[in-house]
């Protein structure tokens, strides 16, 4: 059973930074694709960033390119999302997701992932 636990959320002002962490089971980072999704009140969940640990393939939503960076630390069994230059529209619950690698396509598709964390809240004020 893959278990994912997010942390690092909080409240920041626009222009600030946060780093989210996703801790997982030991084997999660060997041959898996990992992703961050977010869901704002009244909106659908959307893919933000993803990385496949074997190939190093990454994917980012257009809205976060150049501001967010996703990267794993396999030694610590942790996935990170570094978020810089945060905007009020980044306010949402952020979720970590994982699935064993089978393709490098569709990394930001919610249906691809079978394992999910409980989420961590990010609030950006103007």
Image (spheres, helix red, strand yellow):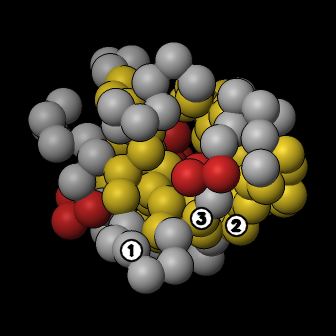
Q: Residue at position x 77%, y 50% from top?
A: 126
Q: Residue at x 85, y 45 (%)?
A: 13
Q: Quadrant of residue 97?
A: bottom left
Instruction: State which mark lies toward you, 2 or 3.
Output: 3
Point 51% across, 40% down: residue:
29
* Location of residue 24 in the rendering, given as x and y in whole percent from the top left corner: 63, 56
Is 37 or 64 nearer to us in this picture? 64
Above/below status of 28 relative to 121: above
- Labels 3 and 1: the sequence-earlier one: 1
Q: Position of residue 118 (x, y in %)?
A: 61, 76
Dot 2, how many residues are within 10 Å of its Cα: few (below 14), some (14-19), or many (20+)? many
Q: What's the distance in space between the residues labelled 3 and 1, CA to CA? A: 9 Å
Residue pointed to by mark 3: 92
Mark 2 and mark 3 residues within 8 Å of each other at the beta carbon: no
The percent coordinates of residue 67 (x first, y second) are: 58, 24
Relative placement, left or right, of 65 versus 59 is right
Q: Splitting the image into 4 quarters, where does residue 117 fall?
A: bottom right
Please, what secondary structure does the residue beneath circle 3 have?
strand
Residue 12: assigned label: none
Q: Residues within 10 Å of mark 1 (few under 14, many from 20)?
A: few
* Pointer 2 or 1: first along the chain: 1
Residue farthest toward the front in the current orientation of the protein: 126
Answer whether residue 23 is visible to the viewer in this image: no
The answer for how far apart the CA atoms under marks 2 and 3 are is: 9 Å
Q: Are marks 3 and 1 in contact (CB under 8 Å)?
A: yes
x then y, percent, for residue 123? 74, 61
Return the mark for residue 120: 2
Q: Earlier in the sequence, mark 2 or mark 3?
A: 3
Callout 3 environment at 10 Å: few (<14), some (14 to 19), or many (20+)? many
- Disc tally is 3
For the question of whether residue 47 can be seen, the reply is yes
Q: Secondary structure at mark 1?
A: loop
């Amino acid at each position: 059973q893959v278990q994912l636990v997010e942390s690092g959320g909080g409240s920041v002002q626009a222009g600030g930074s946060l780093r989210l962490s996703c801790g997982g089971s030991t084997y999660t980072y060997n041959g898996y694709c990992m992703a961050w999704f977010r869901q704002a009140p009244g909106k659908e969940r959307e893919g933000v960033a993803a990385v496949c640990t074997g190939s190093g393939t990454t994917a980012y939503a257009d809205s976060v390119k150049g501001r967010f960076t996703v990267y794993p630390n396999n030694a610590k069994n942790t996935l990170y999302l570094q978020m810089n230059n945060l905007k009020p529209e980044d306010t949402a619950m952020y979720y970590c997701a994982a699935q064993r690698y089978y393709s490098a396509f569709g990394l930001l598709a919610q249906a691809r992932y079978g394992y999910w964390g409980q989420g961590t809240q990010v609030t950006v004020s103007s």
